[in-house]
Image (tube, helix red, strand yellow):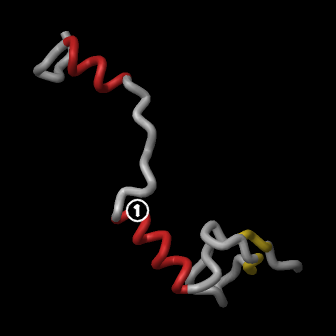
Amino acid sequence: MKRPVVNCPQCGKSVAWDNSNPFRPFCSERCKLIDLGQWATESYRIPDTGKDSEKQENDPSGSEK
């Protein structure tokens, strides 16, 4: 059976997706740590949809009526 191949999210290098790669989906520990560093420095952010912030503006207690 052919092993699935994915691209490293950091550098784009093709990587086999199997148990022999302990850093998957990354190609190396270096790419994995670079990605972790970007999360730690808040370079990556999850977008705010605005729904929760609108509720808080309308009801400062945060509870729904």
Q: Position of residue 8 (x, y in %)?
A: 67, 72
Query: For residue 7, which quarter of the picture?
Result: bottom right
Q: Which x, y percent locates residue 17?
A: 71, 76
Looking at the picture, does residue 64 appear above or below residue 50?
above
Q: Quadrant of residue 18?
A: bottom right
Residue found at the far bottom of this picture? 20
**Left or right for 15, reference 9:** right
Question: What residue lies at 46% left-to-right and 78% top-to-bottom?
Answer: 33
The C terminus sits in image quarter: top left
* Residue 20 picture location, percent across and down: 66, 90
Would residue 48 appear left or right of 57 to someone viewing this image?
right
- Residue 63, quarter of the rendered image: top left
Residue farthest to the right, as pictured = 1
- Residue at image mark 1: 39
Task: Please say if 42 is above or below 64.
Answer: below
Total tally of numbered discs in the picture: 1
**Secondary element at image label 1:** helix
Q: Residue at x 49, y 70 (%)?
A: 35
Indicate left or right for 52 with 59 as reference: right
Q: Residue at x 26, y 18 (%)?
A: 55
Assess disc 1: are there few (<14), some (14-19) or many (≥20) residues with their C-alpha within 10 Å of its C-alpha. Answer: few
Which amino acid lies under the numbered mark 1 shown in the image of this protein?
Trp
Q: Quadrant of the N terminus?
A: bottom right
Which is more toward the observer, 8 or 63?
A: 8
